[in-house]
Every structure is written in C-alpha cells, then in structure tokens.
Image: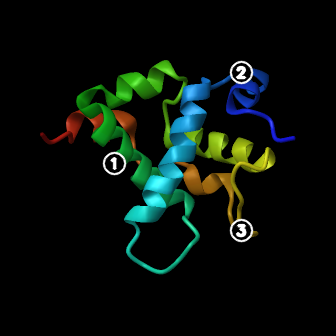
C-alpha cells in the first residue's frame, strides 16, 4: 500500500504534508499549462509551473506560505519531487536528476522583487 503524503512528510521531517500536496498538485497544473504534446515535465519547467501555481493561489503571500512549509529554494521542490518518486507518487525519466532543480530561480526575486499585480 502506498504511503500517504502525511506519512512521507513525517518520515522525512523537512517539509510539511501541505508542501508535498502542493508539489503533487502543481505537477498536474504544470502539465495542463504546457502547450506541447510532451507528457514529461522537466525539473525546470515544474519549478516555473510551481511559481505560477503559488502566485495564483496566494499572490504576494506565496513566499511566506512556502517558507512556512519548509520550502525555501527550487532545490527544495526537487527534494520533494524525488521523495514522491521514491514513494511512487510520481515517476521520472532516466535522465532526470535532482540537480535539474538547482537555482532555477531565487524565491525573493520572483515572489517579492519581480512580483506584479
């Protein structure tokens, strides 16, 4: 039986269950937004989709919500993704790497400095 997001988050201890649910839901959001016929979402594209998803949900509060869940960098998104892959909530291509999530953007820059109403 597949573990719940809450169990995965509690075992890992770095991120709240809400963060895992956000990333999981954000994958679906990002896949829908992609206009190509590709079914695979790269780490960089997922990070960009998660940024849009967060801004749509919480506006200027996005960075505060994510930080309160333990998510402070795009690498954290990758850590969550690979945890979800490990627990069979997501899948990966052989070419996918945790490093695909490194420094895709800076949270302060995109959620505060460049925020547009």
Callout count: 3
Which residue occupies 55% across, 24% down? 70
Up-down relation of residue 65 to residue 97 (above or below): above
Where's residue 115, x and y in %? 20, 39
Which residue is nearer to you in this view: 7 or 108? 7
Residue under numbered circle 1: 52
**Disc 2 to disc 3: CB gap under 8 Å:** no
Where's residue 1, x and y in %? 87, 41
Up-down relation of residue 50 to residue 107 (above or below): below
Query: Does residue 60 appear to the left or right of 4 in the view shown?
Result: left
Residue extending farthest to the bottom is 37
- Mark seen at residue 93: 3
Q: What SS does tag 3 mark?
A: loop
Which residue occupies 71% across, 44% down? 84
Please tell me how crowded label 1 is: few (under 14), some (14-19), or many (20+) other residues with Cα within 10 Å: some
Which residue occupies 29% across, 36% down? 111
**Disc 1 to disc 3: CB gap under 8 Å:** no
N-term-proximal mark, 2 vs 3: 2
Q: What SS does tag 2 mark?
A: loop
Residue under numbered circle 2: 13
Where's residue 114, x and y in %? 21, 42
Where's residue 105, x and y in %? 40, 47
Please tell me how crowded label 3 is: few (under 14), some (14-19), or many (20+) other residues with Cα within 10 Å: few
Up-down relation of residue 87 to residue 9 (above or below): below
N-term-proximal mark, 1 vs 2: 2
Mark 1–mark 3 Cα distance, whole angstroms, equals: 24 Å
Mark 1–mark 2 Cα distance, whole angstroms, equals: 26 Å
In the figure, residue 21 lies in which quadrant?
Answer: top right
Residue extending farthest to the front is 1
The colour scheme of the drawn protein is rainbow
Please tell me how crowded label 2 is: few (under 14), some (14-19), or many (20+) other residues with Cα within 10 Å: few
Query: Does residue 33 appear to the left or right of 2 in the view shown?
Result: left
């Amino acid at each position: 039986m597949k573990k719940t997001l809450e169990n995965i988050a509690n075992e890992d201890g770095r991120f709240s269950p809400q963060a895992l649910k956000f990333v999981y839901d954000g994958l679906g959001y990002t896949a829908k937004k992609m206009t190509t016929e590709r079914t695979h979402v790269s780490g960089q594209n997922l990070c960009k989709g998660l940024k849009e998803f967060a801004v749509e949900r919480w506006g200027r509060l996005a960075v505060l919500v994510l930080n309160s869940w333990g998510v402070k960098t795009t690498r954290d998104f990758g850590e969550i993704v690979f945890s979800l892959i490990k627990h069979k909530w997501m899948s990966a291509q052989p070419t996918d790497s945790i490093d695909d999530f490194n420094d895709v953007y800076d949270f302060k820059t995109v959620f505060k400095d460049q925020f547009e109403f």
